[in-house]
Image (cartoon, helix red, strand yellow):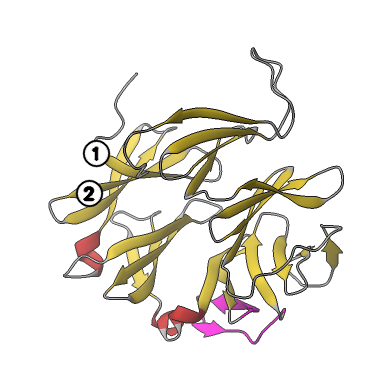
Amino acid sequence: FDVLAKDASDIFYSPDEKKIIFLQQKENDWTLTLIDLEKNTTQELVRGKQLSKQTARLKNLKLSPNAKKLLIETEENKTVKHYIADISTTPATIIQLPYLDKETNDINYVYFNYRDSEKLMLLKKNEVKEVNLANKTISPGLIENVLALSAFADSLYYLDASGLIYKTDYNFNSREQITNKAISVNQTASYSIERLPPNLLLKEDNVVYYLDREDRSFKKLSDFAIGAKPSPDLKKLAFWNNYELWVFYLEKSDDQPQKQLYEKSFLTRFSGKIEN
């Protein structure tokens, strides 16, 4: 095996898994480096000090569906800022989104619109809105009373205040109820949705639920999970708390030892806290 990157503290994959971005910490700074697996090329994209003299912490990073842009979220002295980096150019072109940062503490979710690369989907103050990058504008609320939102290639999934999951198209012309039974909503909790086709996960703070595909209701996977990562084929989910690592099977496995659908297996316990 070849070493792709040393001292990588996090890894981000493009939707087509043909590109990998490594986060590396270097001398009071951080660097994002792109590796193109098809072209076998390496390109430094962004350094933290390009965005802030004091090197703001990288809070979040998301790749656009076509893997040509990055949505970068940084935090410094409790101030959050958003940037768009066009990584199809060399060097990458970076622009800040100050109009998005005016009330950034109220933003719960932001991601690219799969149908239009010049737009972002935004959840702010329980309203779904659309950000137009070209016009630098934010639309009025398109859906109200929303607790969590996730954008995918074919549709938007959201949790509304009733505790049910719905999906809609990008034109907001249709709405389909995904869950048959509402969850008990905690008004002070933070919610997020992750879709691992054909499965769906819901996180309530550090509590993780999975959607049982048979009865279309959420079942608790873990009372306390600080992190989770799916396998590349989306058939397994690794999740962990401070000291323990587990695997959850999203599909039946006939490999030895055989595993049933929705079976959970304990892997190991560490003596020190799991950092990443």
Give, as a three-letter code, the residue at label 2: Gln
- Where in the figure is residue 59, as x and y percent of width and height? 37, 62
Residue 31 x %, y %:
25, 52
Is there CB contact under 8 Å for labels 1 and 2?
Answer: yes
| Quadrant that contains the N terminus | top left
The quadrant the C terminus occupies is top left
Q: Who's the residue at 53% across and 56% down the image?
A: 206
Residue 164 highlighted magenta (yes or no): no
Disc 2 target residue? 25
**Dot 2 crowding, Cα within 10 Å, few <14, some 14–19, many 20+:** some
Q: Which residues are magenta?
A: 126-143
Pick the front one: 198 or 147:
147
- When the figure is inspected, residue 173 is found, relative to residue 63, above or below; the finding is below
Give the residue drawn at x 56%, y 77%: 131
Question: Helix, strand or loop at disc 2?
Answer: strand
CA–CA distance between discs 1 and 2? 7 Å
Numbered label attached to residue 154: none
Does 138 lie within the magenta span? yes
* Circle on res. 7: 1
Query: Looking at the picture, how far across and down is residue 22, in whole percent?
Result: 34, 44
